[in-house]
Image (cartoon, rainbow, N blue to C red):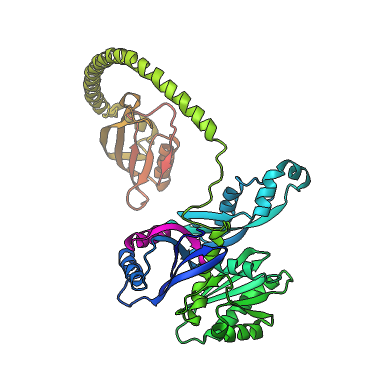
Amino acid sequence: MSGSSVLVLCLEPTGLSAVELSVRAGVARVARTVAVQRPGDVDPAESGELGRWVRVALDDAGVRTKRTVLALPRGNVVLKRVPVPAALLPNETPGAARLALLRAQAVPVQDVVFDCVIPRDQGEARHETDHEDDANTPANAERTILAAALPEDRLSFVREVASSAGLRLAGVRLRAEGTGELVRRASIDGPTLAVATGPGWAEFVTVDRGELLLARETELAPGATLERTVAVEAARTALLQAAGGASVTVAVVGAERAVAEIAERCAETTERPSVVLDPADAVWPESCDPGTIARLAPLVGLALAQSVGRQGLDFLHPSKPPDPNAAVRVRAMMVVALVGILAAGGWLLAQRELDALSARVATVRAQKDDLSGQVVEFFRTDARLNHVERWAEGDPDWIAHLASLREKLPPGDQAVLDSIGGSVEASPVYRPTRRDTYYEGRWTVDRAVRLDLEGRVRERSVANALRQRLIDAGVYRVTTQGADVPDRFSFVLSTPAAAPPATASEVGTR
């Protein structure tokens, strides 16, 4: 980026911030600035409409540069410092960091563009002395790195906005990293909490030893007192950093006369030293309002960081570790190609045999269809025959039933049988098996034989004895009709048996 003109642009919740600048000899020379509010008739959710408005705003400011770095507000990304094993090689770290970041989210995050920042002093040293570290590094040692995830739909949206605005994206970065670069160049000792503000937002960035540790963003409610709200949020952020026991310096980004009151209020609220961070490595146009510098300074910081090749998050070009299996895949592809050539020759030979087999299959299928028809016709005939046979078996052996009853009736001087009647209900039944195949099923007869006995007895005990003999025989289920009277009996006998068996297996009474 050094020496060439570039546009650093940020789509804010309520407006647009942009700087057109070039970096020479470590100094950012800002040619044009854009700091405008979005009109109410522009829909921020419609990429084409938003992109056309951005183009108009840039044209009004005289911006012609198309090469653009898009700065994302902190609220657009999932950002977290995650632990990874210290023994990992640089090419293994991004995958471990991605897994750690996604696991740390309370709500599952899917369809994201992931990037991470591996500190050079850790990554390069590990790569150069990996064998020595293996012997000296504990197996469970960990280090933390900065990891971030941007939803893919948000990246697609900003691409569409840039396309509608006629811009050529060179990177999609995190605005907070620009603030972190300004802190590095200010050479402030110890941990630093940098505060950058703009219309409706404030960003809080914690930097220690040149490394970005934490970034937060707060929306400022309309009508709220800027100084008080920023100071309260700065105190909250400082408490997070103070857990490590280090003293934090608060640095408010912007020109002295524009942010001095904010710095003073932050010092009172946080009870920590507070300074104004006016970027010394930036040359602003004389027409630039001092109150706008705080809003645009992080964008200048991004350009300065990129000019010196500072590693940072870039969702347009996320870090991709070297692929150690590339050579293996090339060899595998060559083997696959060779196999394909051999397979093509074999396919021609196999096709001839396949045609012959297809003809045989057609013949066998025709035979199968013919045999299947014969089997179906056989099953139909068998079913009709079994139905007739089972229906004929439905008639009971009335003679055997009457002979069995005669043996159980009391002598004539004790009882007289006035009437006896019989009826039968029978129907053929086919019962399939669990496999539901006809030939494994079974044809049976459901039969219900009924005998009605009425007569007179000398005394009630004779009728009771007859009833007990019928029950004990185990052939019939005995039911008494009507009320018990001293000199009469009326029984209903029922059984499914065609004839009384030699030994009964089922006894019932009611």
Residue shown at 65% from the left, 75% from the top: 238
Q: Look at the image and say whether residue 438 sits in the magenta stretch.
A: no
Question: Is residue 304 rendered to the left or right of residue 443?
Answer: right
Where does the image place residue 119, in percent across and percent down from the top left?
Answer: 64, 55
Residue shown at 44% from the left, 57% from the top: 170
Where does the image place residue 479, in percent across and percent down from the top left?
Answer: 36, 45
* Position above or below: 137 against 324: below
* Quadrant in the picture for residue 64: bottom left
Residue shown at 59% from the left, 82% from the top: 231
* Quadrant in the picture for residue 129: top right
* Quadrant in the picture for residue 279: bottom right
Q: Considering depth in this image, is 446 or 68 the residue closer to the camera?
A: 68
Q: Considering depth in this image, is 53 or 135 the residue closer to the camera?
A: 53
Which span is picked out in magenta? 153-175
Farthest residue, direction right: 136
Where does the image place residue 318, in percent across and percent down from the top left?
Answer: 51, 52
Q: Look at the image and say whether residue 171 sits in the magenta stretch.
A: yes
* Position above or below: 388 against 78: above
Question: Can I make out residue 12 in this image?
Answer: no
